[in-house]
Image (cartoon, rainbow, N blue to C red):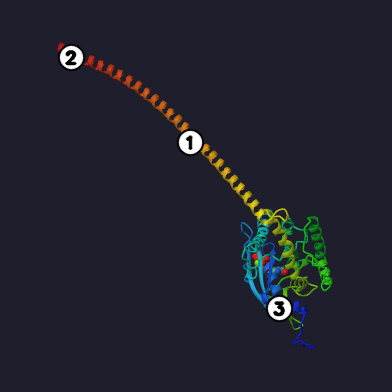
């Protein structure tokens, strides 16, 4: 019997390596949404997190409604490519209507889901080339007031919590004292619970990261400090700081802020979990809702063709209803117009009659005056004649 020798390693234990290689080849996408009041430190935190300048312009305080500004950057670290999208709210918190501000943000998140869904539903999909802009994480910037959660923040977080992974952060936490911060964090957690807001919890089911994630869950909401311009050397190491007349806050010093924890959790440990949760939970829920709206349902009694036919029938009926409504509306409008025209005609006729009567009355009065004048003239003429005759008789007598 001839024995064949293996030329190399054979087996499926290289599958993970193949996956890693393919993923590295394709690159990664990560989309961050920063929600917070104007000037609360959103851009600064992003620049501190990624240690580079992004070209975000400062927002004015007089915008009539909230806008969302989005920028995409191609980053690379070692041989890993990352397409990073940062979206910031502009003008958030400057309007009186809280619901409207929250609605704009929610609509933006759903718009990104809708784009992805439309691509998925295409006959010829190009998912590998498609720029997935679904928001993977929402950093929610809470102002360091030391009081509880503001109504605007509670309303917005509640509205967004089923659509996006929310990580609340206390912005500019260098402006609040250590003891105040502890009390503030507890108050915020209390308010978050009372409003039934679901914030993102770092997963505790993976042995490798469970401990770190558990510790970080206990630290939420992270108290952060950002600094994009100031850097000094501490023990020979360049360190990002905020310098004050009374001292220096080191951004990466864990006794000064939770910035390092946020960076570790967001970029090093849980980026993939955030991406996965977005796809398998947040997007999935949105997709289910939209497909139900479109008339699809997982029912063995209905084939796709039947579903399509039913949907078409439904749409036809809806269109007929719209047509009928429009027809009725048209008839009502025409009737209203007719009524208005008749009314105008009547008013015109009344006006004409009034003018006519007025004119007749003034004509009558003029004729009366003319008659009086003519009789006056007659009397005058008679008198004149009598006077002239009198003068002539007197002349003859002389
Ligand atoms: P808009 O995009 O205009 O709404 O502002 P923003 O939220 O992006 O704030 P930005 O990062 O432009 O920062 C506004 C100001 O806050 C700047 O002067 C920052 O230096 C300052 N700032 C940012 N982060 C911190 C912080 O952690 N602590 C303190 N004290 N100031 C900060
Ligand atoms: Mg900004």
Viewer can see residue 332? yes
Left/right placement of residue 311 relative to residue 222 reads left
> In this picture, is 147 found above or below 318?
below
Residue at the spot of label 1: 341
Of pointers 1 and 3, the one earlier in the residue sequence: 3
> In this picture, is 370 found above or below 160?
above
Residue at the spot of label 2: 392
Instruction: Classify 10 Å Cα crowding around label 1: few (below 14), some (14-19), many (20 and above).
Output: few
Of the pair 74 and 330, the residue shown nearer to us: 330
Of the pair 370 and 392, the residue shown nearer to us: 370
Q: Nearer the viewer, mark 1 or mark 3?
A: 3
Of all residues, the one furthest to the front in this rendering is 1
The quarter of the picture where the N terminus appears is: bottom right
The quarter of the picture where the C terminus appears is: top left
In the rendered image, which quarter is residue 202 located in? bottom right
Residue at the spot of label 3: 21
Q: Nearer the viewer, mark 3 or mark 2?
A: 3
Cα distance in 3D space between marks 3 and 2: 145 Å
Which structural element holds mark 3?
helix
Of pointers 3 and 2, the one earlier in the residue sequence: 3
> In this picture, is 348 found above or below 292?
above
């Amino acid at each position: 019997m001839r024995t064949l020798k293996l030329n190399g390693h054979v087996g499926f234990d290289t599958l993970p390596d193949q996956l890693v290689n393919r993923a590295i080849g394709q690159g990664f996408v990560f989309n961050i949404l920063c929600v917070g009041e104007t000037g609360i430190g959103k851009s600064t935190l992003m620049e501190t997190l990624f240690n580079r300048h992004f070209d975000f312009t400062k927002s004015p305080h007089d915008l009539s409604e909230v806008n969302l500004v989005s920028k995409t950057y191609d980053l690379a670290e070692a041989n890993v490519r990352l397409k990073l999208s940062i979206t910031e709210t502009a003008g958030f918190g400057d309007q009186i209507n809280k619901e409207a501000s929250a609605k704009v943000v929610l609509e933006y998140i759903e718009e990104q889901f809708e784009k992805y869904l439309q691509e998925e539903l295409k006959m010829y999909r190009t998912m590998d080339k498609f720029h997935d802009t679904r928001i993977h994480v929402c950093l929610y910037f809470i102002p360091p007031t030391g009081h509880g959660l503001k109504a605007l923040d509670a309303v917005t977080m509640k509205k967004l919590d089923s659509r996006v992974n929310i990580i609340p952060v206390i912005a500019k936490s260098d402006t609040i004292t250590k003891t105040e911060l502890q009390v503030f964090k507890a108050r915020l957690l209390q308010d978050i619970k009372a409003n039934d807001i679901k914030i993102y919890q770092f997963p505790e089911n993976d042995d490798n990261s469970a401990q770190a994630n558990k510790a970080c869950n206990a630290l939420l909401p992270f108290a952060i400090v950002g600094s994009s311009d100031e850097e000094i050397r501490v023990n020979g190491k360049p360190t990002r700081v905020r310098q004050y007349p009374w001292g220096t806050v080191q951004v990466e010093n864990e006794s000064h802020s939770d910035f390092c924890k946020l960076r570790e959790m967001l970029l090093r440990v849980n980026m993939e979990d955030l991406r996965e949760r977005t796809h398998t939970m947040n997007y999935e829920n949105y997709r289910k809702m939209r497909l139900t709206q479109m008339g699809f349902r997982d029912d063995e009694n209905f084939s796709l063709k039947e579903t399509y036919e039913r949907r078409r029938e439904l749409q036809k009926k809806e269109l007929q209803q719209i047509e009928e409504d429009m027809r009725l509306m048209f008839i009502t409008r025409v009737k209203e117009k007719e009524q208005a025209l008749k009314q105008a005609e009547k008013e015109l006729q009344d006006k004409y009659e009034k003018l006519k009567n007025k004119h007749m009355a003034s004509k009558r009065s003029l004729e009366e005056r003319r008659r009086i004048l003519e009789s006056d003239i007659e009397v005058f003429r008679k008198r004149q004649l009598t006077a002239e005759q009198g003068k002539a008789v007197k002349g003859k007598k002389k």
